[in-house]
Amino acid sequence: MTANIANAAPQGRYAIAVHGGAGRYDYNQFTDEQKAAYHAGLREALLTAKQVLEANGTAVDAVQAAAIKLENNPLFNAGKGAVLNSAGEVELDSSIMDGKTLAAGAVAGLKTTKSPITAARTVMEKSEHVMLQGAGADAFAKAQGLEQVPNSYFITPERKKQLENAQASKEKVNLSKFGTIGVVVLDRYGNLAAGTSTGGLTNKQWGRVGDSPIIGAGTYADNNSCAVSATGHGEYFIRATVARTICALVEFKGMPLQEAAEFVVKDKLVKMGGEGGVIAVDAHGNIALVMNTPGMFRGSLKEGEEPFTGILAGDK
Ligand code: ASP
């Protein structure tokens, strides 16, 4: 009989990576205080996932718990502090995937559900579907008992200002910064999971859906290869099926994770003109944090090691 390792006693070491968006960042644009707040937010997310995993929680549990911290942190473009669409409203997209079962859940265009990642997980576990959108997605979340808030709960003065600037500028949709959040985890049972949550792009056409809730584009996880969460100009990430392509290169070509992530982000996407980055972890606990932008808010933590957080591409 083949043992189901996934259900056996924990025997591996966990690995976690998080991101808080990629972009054309320049160190001088942040005060020391702001930099410290970003590092602290990323670190808090890593430590939240760590706590779940050390209590022998699953990769899916850890992804959700860390993502909620980032959604609740107004610095990041997800949940509270998400960017505004062209109509001055927040529309939230999110997805989650369990690499053990290939189960996945996604939501797009949420307006009142406080935690989009929780809504995505609820779609995965409590519905017959993979993706719900718009009013139906909020109604489903509400019916499942998920906390509802007015749309104004998500809106911060900083994001209002960003919308005004975007609407006044020639570059209508602001593509200089992507603040989406994402988490990828390998748990002690050898299971991978990935999750992504976002407000999308500042001044996006209302109704627009990006890559974050698209399984295979913004999020993918498969125990046979890796777990990936992306951030960047979603239209390109959808067309390049970024997350799934990285996993497919690892699974079918035997490419090392770092190489696969670099090929997709720094070669394929660059040739298409798509800016952004990914975080990824493979079934062996290797982590890749790869971007083609000057920066990406990111962090990683391997069991028994110190957490790392970084902002600019060169941060080590
Ligand atoms: N990828 C997201 C989108 O296009 C934006 C981001 O990463 O911040 O909706």
Image (cartoon, grey):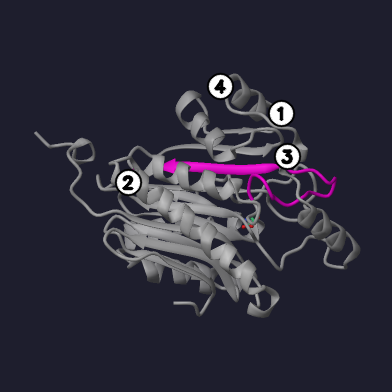
- Of callouts 2 and 4, the N-terminal one: 2
Q: Secondary structure at mark 2?
A: helix
Q: Say which residue label 2 marks.
A: 53
Question: Depth-wise, is mark 2 or mark 4 nearer the camera?
Answer: 2
- Of callouts 4 and 1, the N-terminal one: 1
The amino acid sitting under disc 1 is Ala
Residue in the picture at 60% in, 45% down: 72
Whole-angstrom CA distance, mark 2 to mark 4, is: 26 Å
The total number of labels drawn is: 4
Question: Depth-wise, is mark 4 or mark 1 nearer the camera?
Answer: 4
Residue 287 lies in quadrant: bottom left
Counting from the top left corner in percent of width and height, residue 97 is at 44, 42
For ligand 1, give the image quadrant: bottom right
The amino acid sitting under disc 4 is Gln
Asked whether mark 4 and ligand 1 are closer than 8 Å, the reply comes as no
Residue in the picture at 29% in, 55% down: 283
Whole-angstrom CA distance, mark 4 to mark 1, is: 14 Å
Crowdedness near tag 3: few (<14), some (14–19) or many (≥20) residues, C-alpha within 10 Å: some
Q: Say which residue label 1 marks.
A: 135
- The span shown in magenta is 78-99
- Give yes or no for contact between labels 4 and 1 (Cβ–Cβ under 8 Å): no
Question: Depth-wise, is mark 3 or mark 1 nearer the camera?
Answer: 3
Q: Residue 144 got which mark?
A: 4
Residue 159 lies in quadrant: bottom right
